[in-house]
Amino acid sequence: MSKKIIEEAWDEFKKSIPVNAHPRQFTDMRNAFYAGSMCMFSAMTSGLSEGEEAQESDFQRLDALEEELRAWIVDLKMLEYVDQKMEEYLRDKGPKQ
């Protein structure tokens, strides 16, 4: 059997976990990753129209999910920007050697 879709995504994501992370943090992050996957699967499949043919409401639901995720990406990039600027500020304002 080939590797599972979510497992492949987890294998890629876990590379971002610091190697010195506590094993419990690793476990918690894996649980959160899979819980998020379960939530997304549920959001995508619940409320779909009956039958084999996709309906306009099905596409609207997927569009709404995409829009929400894209907004999260913008927020994430903003947080990364703020963190970077804070690090620069602290580095510049820190003790002079």
Image (cartoon, helix red, strand yellow):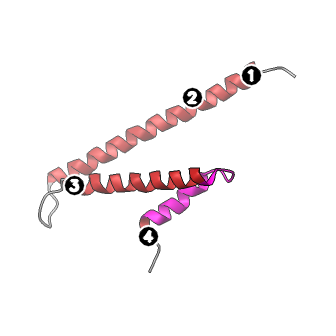
Mark 4 residue element: loop
Question: Which amino acid is tagged 1?
Answer: Asp
Q: Quadrant of residue 85?
A: top right
Would you say the magenta stretch is mainly helix, strand or loop?
Answer: helix
**Between marks 1 and 2, how big is the CA–CA gap?**
15 Å
Question: Which amino acid is tagged 3?
Answer: Ser
In the image as oriented, which residue stretches furthest toward the right?
97
The C terminus, quarter of image: top right
**Between marks 2 and 3, how big is the CA–CA gap?**
36 Å
- Residue with the mark numbered 2: 82
**Between marks 4 and 3, how big is the CA–CA gap?**
22 Å
Earlier in the chain: of badge 2 and badge 3, it is: 3
Mark 1 residue element: helix
Asked whether residue 13 is drawn in magenta, I would say yes
Q: Quadrant of residue 84?
A: top right
Mark 2 residue element: helix
- Residue with the mark numbered 4: 4
Q: Please provide the residue range marked out in magenta.
A: 6-23
